[in-house]
Amino acid sequence: MDELIRRAAALLKQSRHAIALTGAGISTPSGIPDFRSPGSGLWTKADPSEVASIQAFRRNPRVYYQWRRPLMRTLQKAKPNAAHHALAELEQRNLLRAVITQNIDGLHQRAGSRRVLEVHGTAHELVCLGCGQIYRDDESITRVVEQGEVPYCGLCGGVLKPNVVFFGELLPHDVIFEVEREIRQCDLVIVAGSSLEVQPACWWPQEAMAHGAEAVIINYVETYLDERAAVAIHEDVAKALPALVAALD
């Protein structure tokens, strides 16, 4: 891995506009399960169309909150790992312009990253389906869900939905506008902890490469883009990204 890390560090030093694209694999070392790993992925234990589609949620939000209940404390207790801190340090060194993340856990911000584009929203907020009021996912809401109840808006009485993108919903257009600008402008994209299977994020590194950017893939398993990437590292991101930062020195 050392030679691959050195090559990735050289590309990062030479770049003028580097960005990162992160997926669930960057947060699994923090104890947050991903969605698709055989045996442990969340979608191996539940049908997403019945649990996390907007149609199913509007029909019966209690089903979603029953599924979410054991995950709430996990999300609240999770702490950024070495991979999150490494990306934050790259930004502090002015070597990374933005983190585009498919994750909803907020760990990039907690690690110190400032420009984080959350394409699937955040699990730390709820939005009222009636009036649009935004709530922080605080202890009072957690207690409601843990009691088997559905949280409701204190202003209009509407159902509160986590401020994340459900199946059947559009991605936030303002965030996607910023993502597309970063993709067009970057000359290096670091894919960290993403198997590049979820659309449209799976196509963004390829789009960046079409605009002349190089790609560095850091993921435990192979991706469809490995053969075209400048560097592909099949290693735990919590080991590889800190090693990349260390190689810069």
Image (spheres, grey):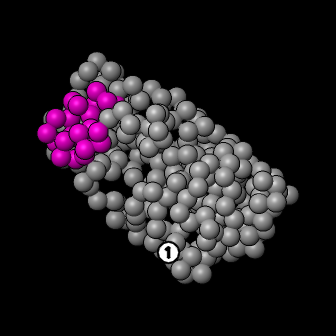
Q: Residue at x 62, y 68 (%)?
A: 227
Q: Is residue 14 above or below residue 249?
A: below
Q: Residue at x 33, y 59 (%)?
A: 171
Q: Residue at x 53, y 63 (%)?
A: 224
Q: Is residue 85 above or below residue 51?
A: below
Name the quadrant containing residue 9: bottom right
Give the residue type that dot 1 points to: Glu
**Residue pushed farthest top?**
147
Question: Which quadrant of the figure contains the C terminus?
Answer: bottom right
Q: Position of residue 157 (x, y in %)?
A: 15, 35
Along the line of sight, the residue nearer the viewer: 68 or 158: 68
Prevailing secondary structure class for the magenta stretch in the rendered image: helix
Name the quadrant containing residue 140: top left
Q: Which SS class for mark 1? A: helix
> In this view of the protein, can residue 246 be seen by the observer?
yes
Could you tell whether 3 is left or right of 230 in the image? right
Q: Is residue 65 magenta?
A: yes
Could you tell whether 4 is left or right of 188 in the image? right
Q: Position of residue 110 (x, y in %)?
A: 57, 42
Along the line of sight, the residue nearer the viewer: 55 or 91: 55
Q: Position of residue 17 (x, y in %)?
A: 64, 72
User: Alpha-carbon neighbours of circle 1 within 10 Å: few (<14), some, or many (≥20)?
Assistant: some
> In this view of the protein, can residue 188 be seen by the observer?
no
Which residues make up the magenta segment? 47-68
Q: How many marks?
A: 1
**Residue pushed farthest bottom?**
211
Along the line of sight, the residue nearer the viewer: 28 or 222: 222
Q: Position of residue 188 (x, y in %)?
A: 64, 71
Q: Residue at x 55, y 42 (%)?
A: 27
Residue indicated by mark 1: 207
Q: Is residue 209 magenta?
A: no
